Image (cartoon, rainbow, N blue to C red):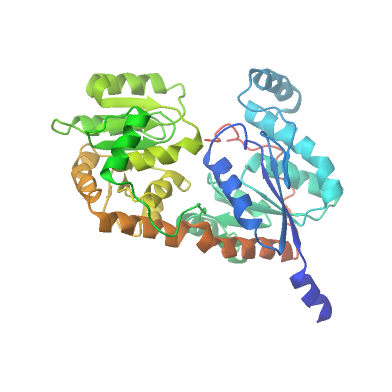
Amino acid sequence: MKDSHSHKNKIVKVFLTCPGLGNINRGFESFTRECFDAISQDSSLDVTLFKGGGTSLKNEITLWNLPREKWTTIQISRVIGKITGIKGSYNTEQLSFFVSLLPYLYRGKPDVIFLSDEQLGIFLWHWRRLTKQNYKLLFSNGAPVFPVDKLARWDRIQQLAPSHLQAALDAGIPAEKQSLIPYGFHIESQAKFLTPNEQKALRQKLGLPDNRRLIISVGAINKSHKRMDYVIREIAQLPEPRPFLLLLGQEDQESGEVIQLGKTLLGVENFQTRTVPYSAIADYYQAADAFVLASIAEGFGRVLVEALSYGLPCMAHDYEISHFIFKNREYLADFTKTGSLTKLIPKALAASEDISQRQAFHRLAYENFSWEKLQPAYVDMIKKCAESRELSSQPNLPLHHQNSEKYD
């Protein structure tokens, strides 16, 4: 009994890893940053954050690596691919980060390594098998991973939504190896909304129209995933004067076509795209009247919770993930159909003028997705991973996975 009791109360040593953190902004990076801030406050955990960029601080270590978007990395990855078969700059980044992490594995001897990047996890899985180390691998399934049976390699899996959990159960992944916990967010317990005058001043500061209804969408400015072109076409169907549309996000190879479509259908005086730091996005949520995310598939959809937390009515595609986040279908529709978003917009803009509805949106986000509410569940998940008796084993696990380039 004494040994069991001491094991239960020992401090669990956690390595929280994210190669992209400090270099790029994705959901993985935002989550990892906030997760570290939240779980570090629990005295039963000893947490060290390992990141790919930025400054090393107390319990935060920046590891040397070859960032995926650098020209040098892209060239080196071609050579590595020919020699090892591990192709792509993303895999090269993950491999270089993994190599830099090795000395810390030996010296630090973590109980649990908590990660979101599948490729880094594969390297760590193989290293554990070769060296007989006994750290546990806790995988946050944010992409999510397909085929689902590949999740069997992890000692514990964080599933972000019920549909992902059910898919894993259907694939034979035991329930006792999984935890259903959504992403956490820094959300104030009390809603704070700008007055009309404050919002007008903020829009002037941001260089946005201060006498128009403003709809924003946040995500990569593309057609294939975020479907920004759909948003443009749907707003173009509204009678004038239409709302002003602002698209916030990174540009990619599809962005030029999206931007040209916006200028053609809406006009430059009614439409803008911007790329801003993640830290600046809060101002844009506060300046907006409504939010839309047109993608029809997401691992979770962090921006929906972010927008809700600022009291914005959020319009989204009607499917399992949006049902889980919103708990109802009031502002959901089938975004594969023309006209669906167009019909939702007047309803959402009307809700933005109702303070009680805006407060309800904020309360929904706070009660279900704030770190204040979720932190105990994260700590419990980590401890359950540390206490799992057997290390996962999958003898035929390849050294890299086929979809390693699809990290957005």
Residue 47 in view, yes or no: yes
Residue 264 point in image, percent of width and height: 25, 19
Report the number of numbered marks. 0
Residue 369 point in image, percent of width and height: 47, 57
Of 271 and 105, nearer the camera is: 271
Identify the residue at horizontal 60%, vertical 45% (top origin).
33
Q: Is residue 339 above or below residue 360?
A: above
Quadrant location of the N terminus? bottom right
Point out the residue furthest to the bottom here.
Answer: 1
Identify the residue at horizontal 81%, vertical 44% (top origin).
104
Q: Is residue 132 left or right of residue 347?
A: right
Identify the residue at horizontal 71%, vertical 20% (top origin).
76
- Picture quadrant where residue 118 is located: top right
Of 333 and 114, nearer the camera is: 114
Residue 187 point in image, percent of width and height: 46, 54
Point out the residue furthest to the left here.
Answer: 239
Residue 4 point in image, percent of width and height: 79, 76
Residue 288 in view, yes or no: no
Q: Is residue 277 left or right of residue 3?
A: left
Of 166 and 362, nearer the camera is: 362
Identify the residue at horizontal 61%, vertical 51% (top origin).
37
